[in-house]
């Protein structure tokens, strides 16, 4: 039940990786799978991406495990010095701090996310 990334999908779903329930001998994603089943019943092909390291299998609906790719990106990003161009970031930060105070993310947080 491993899905492959391919063109022509009507919808792509990102599972939270945690909302699986054992139904019989398979794992059912109680958030995403009903939507996928309804779309596919109507002829719309879908793709489900599943993060996190716990691999529920067999799965009721095929999905593509993406945690290894996420981990690889994080590893490579940790050795790369990203210097994004952030036009108007200072204005955004001033507005965010006025509204959220110290909870507003600073430039370093945004760079780490990038």
Image: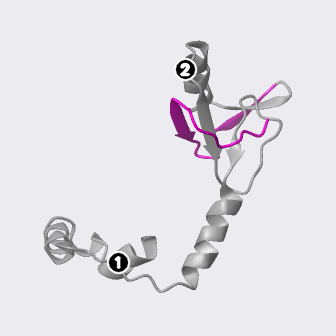
Q: Are marks 2 and 1 in contact (CB under 8 Å)?
A: no
Residue 97: % across, % down: 18, 72
Q: Is residue 13 above or below residue 34?
A: below
Tell me: 16 left or right of 99. Answer: right
Q: Which mark is residue 39?
A: 2
Residue 5: % across, % down: 65, 43
Per the rendered image, the range of residues in magenta is: 1-23
Which numbered disc, 2 or 1, marks the residue closer to the eye?
1
Residue 41: % across, % down: 60, 13
The residue at which mark 1 appears reads as 84
Looking at this view, is 95 or 21 the one in front?
Answer: 95
Q: Residue, x 75% and y 28% (percent of image)?
A: 60
Q: Residue, x 20% and y 73% (percent of image)?
A: 87
Looking at this view, is 44 or 34 the one in front?
Answer: 44
Q: Secondary structure at mark 1?
A: loop
The outermost residue toward the front is 7
Q: Secondary structure at mark 2?
A: helix
Residue 5 lies in the magenta stretch: yes
């Amino acid at each position: 039940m491993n899905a492959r990334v391919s063109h022509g999908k009507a919808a792509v779903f990102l599972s939270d990786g945690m909302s699986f329930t054992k139904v019989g001998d398979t794992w059912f994603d109680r958030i995403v799978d009903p939507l996928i089943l309804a779309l596919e019943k109507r002829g719309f092909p879908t793709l489900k991406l599943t993060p996190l390291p716990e691999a529920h299998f067999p799965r009721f609906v095929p999905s593509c495990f993406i945690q290894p790719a996420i981990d690889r990106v994080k590893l490579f990003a940790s050795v790369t010095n990203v210097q994004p161009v952030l036009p108007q970031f200072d204005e955004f930060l001033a507005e965010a701090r006025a509204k959220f105070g110290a909870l507003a993310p600073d430039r370093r947080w945004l760079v780490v996310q990038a």
